[in-house]
Image: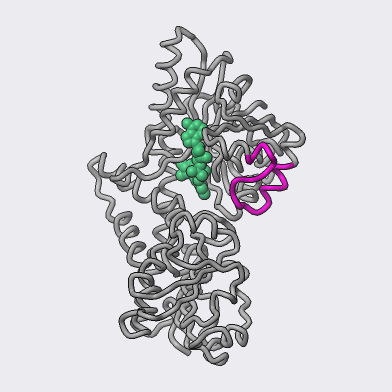
């Protein structure tokens, strides 16, 4: 099939690459000329495990193409994916400017007798209807009578495992009004559905709501567990045991019950806020969603507060080493990363900070500039530091050389925002060890 994907961000480039890998001819479009030039040279604009290899291979075989011209990409596209950003507006609602602009551009460039336009961006309920209206308006202005359907096909990939998630999705959700559109989408997704994973057909509004509801549920589980962990800290219970005790209940399950430094990234924070706005616009209270957000905002302060209170209320003259900056491991994405808030709190309390991250340093520099120092080696961060803060649980950090770390640190103090180590093991190794919701050994 001939496919156009508009937007080559974390979702667009992965989606385009996977469809190309499955034998389709894909044209990706982006208005960012630098990004397009980079991709043309065979380089991935993002860090995503496994992406570079597939991208290079498909660029070579010309199944993956990239351009800044939407008209060029749409020349023979039977399916057009909208995968542009929907960042939060000032009031928390989804800023739909990019989606609507693209919808109008699609209307101007449709020319096949029938095209399926797919909303892959995460969008408020009713967007498929608005996109349909915008495209139809352009066709009317051109005096063209072309047939098209707008489909909602929300994306559930996770940064860090995006390739695997797209090749082996838990399910594919298709929201459409017409059988013709369903059939086109079923054919497109046939290769990934051979493992008997479900393709769920529904109306566009339900598909749009499914995406927000799924992300909000995951965010809520995280906030719930963070609240339980903070309580564990107060009552001397161990959240690690509590998680196992809860998760073994088949009605609950284990995933997304890890306490930590709060959720970040480009999806959970903005999607929860956007759903709150959808509720407001429809005269509904979003009590749980509001609480989820509030708990998360507070959780981002917890680790820094532990550091500040350990050092007696201020960090003047203290030097703190930080491990992990990206909002989660295996990505260079810094959007809404808890590390930014934690580091700013440490700086505000008077500390100096030196940080390491395997891939997110360049993106962090764009946010924090030279407010902190950056290190290419994780142990270098700790040289002469008064304490270490582990913020993102990269695999590299799981195996710490305790002796080396003790030699580097001025005081053997570790603040572990992701419960990566065992309190008893840390005590035996001679560390003063703080984590989230676990009692001191
Ligand atoms: P992103 O910001 O990384 O990428 C968006 C891209 O769209 C950018 O490269 C931008 O230059 C391009 N763009 C903007 N306007 C354009 C236009 N008029 N024409 C062509 N290109 C244009 O965003 P992302 O993280 O890929 O997310 C895209 C959508 O997918 C969002 O709605 C997001 O909520 C959703 N989503 C993201 C993830 C994720 O993990 N990142 C997962 C699931 C769903």
Residue 408 vertical position relative to residue 200 in the rendered view, above or below:
below
Give the extent of the magenta segment.
38-56
Res 364 visible: yes
- Check if residue 51 falls in the magenta segment: yes
Query: Can residue 154 be seen at all in this image of the molecule?
Result: no
Q: Does the magenta segment cover residue 214?
A: no
Residue at image position (40%, 44%) is 87
**Residue 148 screen position, x and y as percent:** 51, 19
Count of numbered labels shown in the rendering:
0
Q: Quadrant of residue 210?
A: top left
Q: Position of residue 280 (x, y in %)?
A: 25, 44
Q: Residue at x 41, y 46 (%)?
A: 212
Q: Residue at x 57, y 39 (%)?
A: 34
* Rendered location of residue 325, percent (x, y): 50, 63
Picture residue at 45% right of the left edge, 38% below the top: 207
Q: Quadrant of residue 130?
A: top left
């Amino acid at each position: 099939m001939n496919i156009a994907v508009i937007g080559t961000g974390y979702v667009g480039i992965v989606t385009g690459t996977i469809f190309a890998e499955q034998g389709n001819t894909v044209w990706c479009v982006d208005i960012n000329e630098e990004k397009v030039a980079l991709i043309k040279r065979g380089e991935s604009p993002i860090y995503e495990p496994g992406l570079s290899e597939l991208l290079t291979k498909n660029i070579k075989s010309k199944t993956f193409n990239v351009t800044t011209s939407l008209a060029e990409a749409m020349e023979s596209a039977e399916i057009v994916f909208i995968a542009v950003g929907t960042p939060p507006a000032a009031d928390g609602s989804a800023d739909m400017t990019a989606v609507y602009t693209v919808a109008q551009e699609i209307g101007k460039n449709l020319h096949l007798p029938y095209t399926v336009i797919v909303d892959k961006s995460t969008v408020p309920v009713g967007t498929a209807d608005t996109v349909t209206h915008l495209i139809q308006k352009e066709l009317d202005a051109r005096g063209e009578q072309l047939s098209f359907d707008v489909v909602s096909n929300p994306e559930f990939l996770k940064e860090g495992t995006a390739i695997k998630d797209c090749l082996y999705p838990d399910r594919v959700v298709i929201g459409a009004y017409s059988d013709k559109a369903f059939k086109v989408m079923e054919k497109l997704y046939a290769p990934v559905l051979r493992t008997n994973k479900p393709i769920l057909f529904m109306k566009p509004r339900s598909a749009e709501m499914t995406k927000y509801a799924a992300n909000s549920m995951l965010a809520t589980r995280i906030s719930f567990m963070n609240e339980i962990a903070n309580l564990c800290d107060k009552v001397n219970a161990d959240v690690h045991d509590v998680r196992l005790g809860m998760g073994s209940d088949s009605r609950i399950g284990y995933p997304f019950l890890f306490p930590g430094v709060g959720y970040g990234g480009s999806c959970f924070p903005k999607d929860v806020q956007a759903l709150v706005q959808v509720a407001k616009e429809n005269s509904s209270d979003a009590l749980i969603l509001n609480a989820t957000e509030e708990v998360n905002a507070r959780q981002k302060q917890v680790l820094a507060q532990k550091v500040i209170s350990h050092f007696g209320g201020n960090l003047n003259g203290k030097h703190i080493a930080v491990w992990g900056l990206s909002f989660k491991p295996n990505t260079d994405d810094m959007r809404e990363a808890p590390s930014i808030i934690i580091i700013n709190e440490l700086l505000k309390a008077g500390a100096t900070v030196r940080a390491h991250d395997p891939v997110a340093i360049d993106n962090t520099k764009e946010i924090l500039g030279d407010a902190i120092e950056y290190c290419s080696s994780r142990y270098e961060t700790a040289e002469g530091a008064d304490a270490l803060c582990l913020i993102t649980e990269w695999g590299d950090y799981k195996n710490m050389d305790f002796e080396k770390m003790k030699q580097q640190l001025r005081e053997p103090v570790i603040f572990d925002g992701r419960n990566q180590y065992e309190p008893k093991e840390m005590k035996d190794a001679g560390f003063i060890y703080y984590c989230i919701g676990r009692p001191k050994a």
